[in-house]
Amino acid sequence: MTTFVTTSLDTDHLVDLATWCANDYGIPSADWQSLLACLAPLRAHNPETYAHSMRVGLYAGGLGAFEGHNASYTLGGGCVHDLGKLTISNDVLRADPFTDTDFAIIQAHPVTGFNMLHDDHPLLALVAGLHHQFQKRAYGIGLDHPAFTDLSEVARAQVVECIGIVATCDFYDAATTRNDAFAHAPDDVRQNMAANGWPASRIDWLFSNDLSASASGKGSLALEVR
């Protein structure tokens, strides 16, 4: 077990840590560099969303390893889940307050991300397209999309498991780092996540492996070396 203790990680450190994890989880270097190249325009467009994506990838990779899933898939899926926000204006991404009109615009990002990734990274594309599918206000490509339904039963199960992990990590990172009305104290985040049906074991793992400086002044990420 390797534990990284961090303080308010900047973006370069997040990328370095994610790269270390990608290597540890067995992602070929060329594949990882291809994924980072896909994400580079998002970093230029909206650094906050890019950093959020890196944190979600780190959380999802660590949680996937902890639960015995394919950590390379959960890491990659977490990193690309919001790629479709590349086409959303910063006026919307940084809106405060966030209005119903803003929400209607931002609902396009899963489909956009799916389309951007599908040719080169078809399984990661499904994470981008489906990561909002299991929330109360579901949106995205839908579980009836042929890219999902044409998979084998085993592959569909793997995709669903990855989406569940990424969605949990996405919610957690947004709730603990965003500097707006969505962010809450740790106890409120726990209650909100429980009310939304996220598994208690995942909630506990995330709070025990927090990467942000907001909750405790430091974060630690326990990574199983596999």
Image (tube, rainbow, N blue to C red):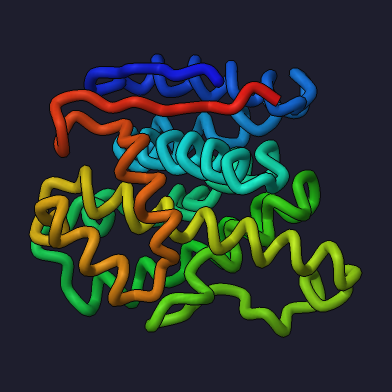
Number of marks drawn = 0
Location of residue 37 (image quadrant): top right
Q: Position of residue 176 (x, y in %)?
A: 22, 47
Which quadrant is home to the N terminus? top right
Position above or below: 213 against 104: above
In which quarter of the view is residue 56 placed?
Answer: top left
- Give the x, y percent position of residue 19: 58, 20
Give coordinates of residue 87: x percent, y percent.
45, 53
Residue at 79%, 70% (x, y): give it: 147
Q: Which residue does the image show at 48% across and 21% down from the upper left?
A: 15
Classify 106 as above or below 25. below
Which residue is rendered at x = 16% and y = 51% of the image? 186
Quarter of the C terminus within the rendering: top right
Q: Is residue 178 left or right of residue 160?
A: left
Looking at the image, which is closer to me, 68 or 107? 68
Residue at the spot 24% in from the left edge and 18% down from the top edge: 7
Side of 30 where 55 appears, left or right: left
Classify residue 93 as left or right of residue 121. left
Where residue 64 sits: x, y (%)?
Answer: 60, 45
In the image shown, does 22 or 104 lie closer to the viewer? Answer: 22
